[in-house]
Image (spheres, helix red, strand yellow):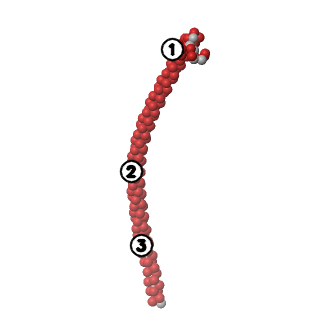
Amino acid sequence: MEEILNSLPEPMQINVTTLIIAVMFLVLIVVLNSLIFKPLIAVLDKRKSQIEEGRAAHEHAESTVAESTAAYQEKLREARKKAQVKGQDLLKESEMAREEMIALSREKALAMVQAAATELDQQVGKAKTTLDQESRVIAQQIVSSVLARATA
């Protein structure tokens, strides 16, 4: 084996310098591992856990928003139903008020027609009486005028 090692070119031969470099490399790995890699891995793990917590919070917020939206939609549907029922009730009430107004108007109109008919009957009665009196006066005038001619 020594022959093989000695047959290698100078830079590839193992000697004390190579061993020192190997030991320094191992010490450097240990130092870098404790000073850089472990803290870096800890920071990356912490960041990963924060990302996961953020993702979980986001999912929770989305589910809360979805639940709130569903509750809002349900309340909106209920409010629309109530408004529709209230609108129908108002429509019924206004229809009843309209019918009452029509009935009152008909009663007033009928009363006015009856009052007018009564007044008309009274005026007709007066007119008949006046006509009767005037016709009697005219008849007497005619009779007087005819009799005055007949005697003459």
Mark before the other along the chain sequence, 3 or 1: 1
Residue where numbered disc 2 is placed: 92
Tell me, yes or no, if residue 95 can be seen here.
Answer: yes
Q: Picture quarter containing residue 25?
A: top right
Q: Is residue 72 above or below residue 22?
A: below
- Marks 3 and 2: in contact by CB < 8 Å? no
Estimate the x, y position of residue 82 in percent, counting from the top left.
Answer: 40, 43
Report the residue at 49% width, 26% height from top. Answer: 51
Report the residue at 44% width, 74% height from top. Answer: 131
Marks 3/1: CA distance? 164 Å
Mark before the other along the chain sequence, 2 or 3: 2
Of residue 58 and residue 17, the one placed in the foreground of this image is: 17
Q: Amino acid under label 1? A: Met
Q: Is residue 24 above or below residue 70?
A: above
Marks 1/2: CA distance? 113 Å
Q: Amino acid under label 2? A: Lys
Label 2 sits on a secondary structure element that is helix
Mark 3: few/some/many CA within 10 Å (<14, 14-19, 20+): few
Report the residue at 39% width, 58% height from top. Answer: 107
Estimate the x, y position of residue 141 in percent, counting from the top left.
Answer: 46, 81
Mark before the other along the chain sequence, 1 or 2: 1
Of residue 150 and residue 101, the one placed in the foreground of this image is: 101
Of residue 80 and residue 145, the one placed in the foreground of this image is: 80
Residue where numbered disc 1 is placed: 1
Residue where numbered disc 3 is placed: 128
Looking at this rendering, what residue extends furthest in the right direction?
10
Label 1 sits on a secondary structure element that is loop
In the displayed structure image, the side of residue 8 where residue 58 appears, left or right: left
Label 3 sits on a secondary structure element that is helix
Q: Is residue 111 above or below residue 32?
A: below
Estimate the x, y position of residue 102 in percent, counting from the top left.
Answer: 41, 57
